Amino acid sequence: MSERVGLVRIDGRPAGRLEETPNGSRFTYLPDWLNTPHAQPVSLTMPLRREPYESKGLHPFFENLLPEGWLLELSTAKLKIAKDDAFGLLLALCANCVGAVEVIATADGGDG
């Protein structure tokens, strides 16, 4: 499996890196974000810390950003992405999510 990576931004500012792993996914806060005086966590379920969060599959917070029902059907058909490819759907659909958090697909997971 090729590793896919997303830059996670909060209010448009780089906050973390989300990586696809053989067992699921890994989210890591960026050092610059952790050193920001008013840094906020992406979710209450992922408080600020230097250690990565490892998840089987996609972490539930990120999974909850995905569409459901008829919008999921429409999105997967239009984008030709399998319904069970949660990571691919996240990268394709969440660059401009409702709310403060967005996930931008990157080639290298850079912070900018």
Image: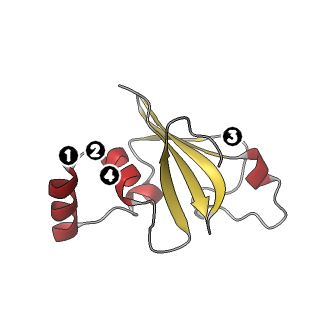
What is the secondary structure assignment of the residue under circle 4?
helix
Q: What is the CA distance from the residue labelled 2 to the residue labelled 4?
A: 6 Å
Q: Residue at x 65, y 49 (%)?
A: 112
* Disc number placed over residue 27 in the picture, else none: none
Q: In the shown orientation, is residue 13 left or right of residue 1?
A: right
Tell me where residue 75 appears, x and y as whole percent: 22, 60
Considering only order in the chain, which callout, 4 or 1, is on the residue closer to the N terminus? Answer: 1
**Closer-to-camera residue (17/78):** 78
Q: In the shown orientation, is residue 96 left or right of residue 66?
A: right
Which residue is tagged 2? 85
Coloration mode? secondary structure
User: Disc 2 vs disc 3: which is toward the camera?
Assistant: 2
Q: Residue at x 71, y 55 (%)?
A: 48
Which residue is tagged 3? 51
User: Label 3: few (<14), some or many (≥20) within 10 Å?
Assistant: few
Q: Residue furthest bottom?
A: 99
Quarter of the image for residue 15 reads bottom right
What amino acid type should be assigned to the residue bearing mark 4?
Leu
Q: Residue at x 39, y 63 (%)?
A: 64
Tell me, yes or no, whether the two marked residues, 1 and 2, touch with CB atoms within 8 Å.
yes
User: Label 1: few (<14), some or many (≥20) within 10 Å?
Assistant: few
* Disc number placed over residue 82 in the picture, else none: 1
What is the secondary structure assignment of the residue under circle 2?
loop
What amino acid type should be assigned to the residue bearing mark 1?
Ala
Quadrant holding the N terminus: top left
What is the secondary structure assignment of the residue under circle 1?
loop
Which residue is tagged 4? 89
User: Label 2: few (<14), some or many (≥20) within 10 Å?
Assistant: few
Tell me where residue 103 appears, x and y as whole percent: 49, 55
Tell me, yes or no, whether the two marked residues, 2 and 4, touch with CB atoms within 8 Å.
yes
Q: What is the CA distance from the residue labelled 3 to the residue labelled 4?
A: 25 Å
Q: What is the CA distance from the residue labelled 1 to the residue labelled 4?
A: 8 Å
